């Protein structure tokens, strides 16, 4: 194939490469970010079928697959317009990064105008992809938030410290109207002080969480007080940062 025109797109997904690559190896996961009915046969020569929510169908064939770092496949439209089946080539590589996984996509085309038509399509589709990976990676986000709130009311110092170690990164940051904390060396004595000066106060989640791309928003109440916390989750599935807003 003569494919002189390329489209490049990259982004960071908050999950390990092996986790991200599962979405190229399992048809159920593949369909989550393309559309119901989409399938992939993850082997050289395997068929790729994509049924977009609009009903548009595209097909391809796996050219190369090297878990969890690389997949190459052809891409074209069943209708033949604007790309016949087999007439363009997609290469996706995954590399570990401090934020999780750096994804690099390259799509090679025969015509520049067809490439340009796909710029926004890939921007949109990869955003969906990152979000479905995050939804699976952080499927227990609500429970994580609940345990965070519960730990603030735990009066057993050793148990409280162990809980925070399970839930959060040692370098976790916490900020609200009364706090500017960095790491466990700040957080743990701050929680102890909060218990001393506000004995019996217990925060509980109010309503469902809102989650997007590893960012979680959770409303809370504690007696006559209430507010909202924003949690940033890391690729290790631990809390990396919390910002609190008081109502």
Image (tube, rainbow, N blue to C red):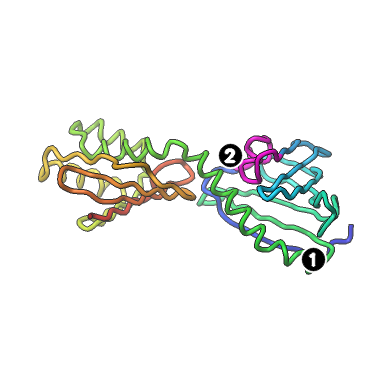
Residue lying at 18% horizontally and 48% vertically, measured from the top left: 225
Say which mark, if any, is on residue 241: none
Magenta: main secondary structure equals helix
In-image side of 15 versus 191 (left or right): right
Front-lying residue, 28 or 16: 28
Would you call the spot at circle 2 few (<14 residues within 10 Å), some (14-19), or many (20 or more)? Answer: some
SS category of the residue bearing label 1: strand
The quarter of the rendered structure image containing the C terminus is: bottom left
Would you call the spot at circle 1 few (<14 residues within 10 Å), some (14-19), or many (20 or more)? Answer: some
Q: How many marks can you see?
A: 2
In reply to whether residue 82 is colored magenta, the answer given is no
- Which contiguous range is marked in magenta? 18-38
Q: Position of residue 1 (x, y in %)?
A: 89, 57
Q: Quadrant of residue 9?
A: bottom right
In reply to whether residue 35 is colored magenta, the answer given is yes
Residue 32 seen anywhere in this rendered image of the structure: yes
Residue lying at 37% horizontally and 49% vertically, measured from the top left: 217
Q: Looking at this rendering, what residue extends furthest in the bottom direction?
A: 113
Mark 1 — residue?
Answer: 5
Residue lying at 24% horizontally and 43% vertically, measured from the top left: 188
Is residue 116 positioned above or below 195 on the image? below
* Label 2 vs label 1, nearer the camera: 1
Q: Looking at this rendering, what residue extends furthest in the right direction?
A: 1
Q: Position of residue 189 (x, y in %)?
A: 20, 45
Front-lying residue, 37 or 139: 37
In-image side of 8 versus 193 (left or right): right
Please say if the residues under marks 2 and 1 sit with CB atoms less than 8 Å apart: no
Mark 2 — residue?
Answer: 19
Residue lying at 58% horizontally and 50% vertically, measured from the top left: 128
Front-lying residue, 26 or 186: 26
SS category of the residue bearing label 2: helix
Tell me which numbered mark, 2 or 1, is placed earlier along the sequence: 1
């Amino acid at each position: 194939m003569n494919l002189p025109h390329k489209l490049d797109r990259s982004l960071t997904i908050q999950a390990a490469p092996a986790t991200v690559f599962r979405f190229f190896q399992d048809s159920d996961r593949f369909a989550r970010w393309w559309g119901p009915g989409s399938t992939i046969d993850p082997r050289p020569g395997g068929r790729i079928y994509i049924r977009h929510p609009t009903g548009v169908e595209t097909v391809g064939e796996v050219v190369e697959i090297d878990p969890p770092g690389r997949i190459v496949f052809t891409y074209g439209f069943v209708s033949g317009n604007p790309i016949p089946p087999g007439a363009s080539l997609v290469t996706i590589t995954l590399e570990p990064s401090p934020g999780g996984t750096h994804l690099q996509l390259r799509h090679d085309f025969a015509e520049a105008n067809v490439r340009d038509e796909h710029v926004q399509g890939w921007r949109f589709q990869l955003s969906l992809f990152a979000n479905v990976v995050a939804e699976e990676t952080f499927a227990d986000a609500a429970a994580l938030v609940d345990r965070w709130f519960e730990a603030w009311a735990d009066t057993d110092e050793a148990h409280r410290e162990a809980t925070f170690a399970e839930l959060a990164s040692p370098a976790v940051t916490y900020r609200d109207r009364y706090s500017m904390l960095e790491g466990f060396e700040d957080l743990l004595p701050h929680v102890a002080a909060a218990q001393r000066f506000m004995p019996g106060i217990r925060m509980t989640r109010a309503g469902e969480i809102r989650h997007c791309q590893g960012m979680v928003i959770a409303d809370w109440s504690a007696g006559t007080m209430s507010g909202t916390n924003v949690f940033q989750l890391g690729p290790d599935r631990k809390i990396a940062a919390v910002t609190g807003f008081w109502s």
